[in-house]
Image: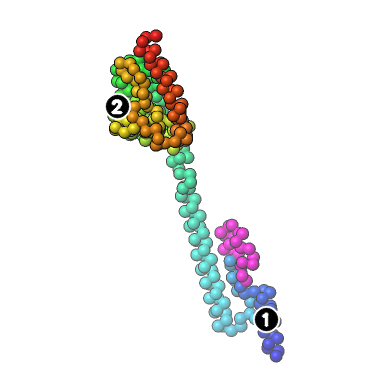
């Protein structure tokens, strides 16, 4: 009877002082620091012997020392793991912000100048000296290609400029490359790039014997006559996709075609 009472008292005392207390009741999930977590783990797993139950035999002493050694080894391993994870996480770049994208590249000034010359030759939409402009266009494409191969075209504006330069090429591959450059400019956030992306695709399609789909291309007959849009699949895309790319609706394109026709007729008659 006395032993039973003493056993219950010892159990109550152990419950109060505790050998191991469940950490969930202490809210350890709120401890953000790894070192604090380790220290708390040690505090809650350290054997706490009630005063009246301290080990007296040699076997009990050995058991207590064995537990202490194992806990020390565990704490050391956890501490090493924490240090290793901390070092590796600080050394690796974040996948959300790649190191290459954190540096802001400057626009290519030479390419910008070539783009300005390309557009100046087409002021008003008409080319006064076709042979000269064709030669200059070819020179600009050669130089732009060299820049592209040398990784000197990097920004959204660079890709936008390069797309226009190759849009004024002669071969389907020129227009296909122009489209790829335009799509890159779009992906880099250039606000006006969707239009040139649509125009380069239309020109590529027409030059491989297919119909354009956005309606950005117009044809001016050399001897005078009606301005047309050539082969054109008007049904594939809804106007909403044209508008999203900065291209006029079908109705707006017809208004644009009539305006071009008036300008073309005036230039043909010399008025």
Quarter location, residue 14: bottom right
* Residue 173 on image: x %, y %: 30, 32
Crowding at dot 1, Cα within 10 Å, few <14 / some 14-19 / many 20+, comes out as: some
Few, some or many residues within 10 Å of mark 2 (<14, 14–19, 20+): few
- Residue drawn at (44%, 29%) of the image: 250
Q: What colouring style does the render use? A: rainbow
Front-most of 172 and 66?
172
Secondary element type, mark 2? loop
The one of 6 and 196 positioned closer to us in this rendering: 196
The residue shown at (39%, 32%) is 234
Task: Locate residue 36 relative to residue 133 in the image: left or right.
Answer: right
Per the image, is 38 magenta? yes
* Residue placed under numbered mark 1 in the picture: 10
Task: Name the magenta segment's main secondary structure.
Answer: helix
What residue span does the magenta drawing correspond to?
21-40
Q: Position of residue 126 (x, y in %)?
A: 38, 18
Report if residue 165 is visible in the image.
no
Disc nearer the start of the sequence (1/2):
1
Residue at figure coordinates x 68%, y 87% from the top left: 4
Q: Nearer the viewer, mark 1 or mark 2?
A: 2
User: How many badges with numbers are in the image?
Assistant: 2
- Name the outermost residue toward the bottom: 1
Out of 77 and 28, give the one closest to the viewer. Answer: 28
Residue 154 in the image: state x and y as whole percent.
41, 34
Residue marked by disc 2: 170
Return the residue nearer the eye: 19 or 223. Answer: 223
Task: Indicate left or right for 112 with 9 as reference.
Answer: left
């Amino acid at each position: 009877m006395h032993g039973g009472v003493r056993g219950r008292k010892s159990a109550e005392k152990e419950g109060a002082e505790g050998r191991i207390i469940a950490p969930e009741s202490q809210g350890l999930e709120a401890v953000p620091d790894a070192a604090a977590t380790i220290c708390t783990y040690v505090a809650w797993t350290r054997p706490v012997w009630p005063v009246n139950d301290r080990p007296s035999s040699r076997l009990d002493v050995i058991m207590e020392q064995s537990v202490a050694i194992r806990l020390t080894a565990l704490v050391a391993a956890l501490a090493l793991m924490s240090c290793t994870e901390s070092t590796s996480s600080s050394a690796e770049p974040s996948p959300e912000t790649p190191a290459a994208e954190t540096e802001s590249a400057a626009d290519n000034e030479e390419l910008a100048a070539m783009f300005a010359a390309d557009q100046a030759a087409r002021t008003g939409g008409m080319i006064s000296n076709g042979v000269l402009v064709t030669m200059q266009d070819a020179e600009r494409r050669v130089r732009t290609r060299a820049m592209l191969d040398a990784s000197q075209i990097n920004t959204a504006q660079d890709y936008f400029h390069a797309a226009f330069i190759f849009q004024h090429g002669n071969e389907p591959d020129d227009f296909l490359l122009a489209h790829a450059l335009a799509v890159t400019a779009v992906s880099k956030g250039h606000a006006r790039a969707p239009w040139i992306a649509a125009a380069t695709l239309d020109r590529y399609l027409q030059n491989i014997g297919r119909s354009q789909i956005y309606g950005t291309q117009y044809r001016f007959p050399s001897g005078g006559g009606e301005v047309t849009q050539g082969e054109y699949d008007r049904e594939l895309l809804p106007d909403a996709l044209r508008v999203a790319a900065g291209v006029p609706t079908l109705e707006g394109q017809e208004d644009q075609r009539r305006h071009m026709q008036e300008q073309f007729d005036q230039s043909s008659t010399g008025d």
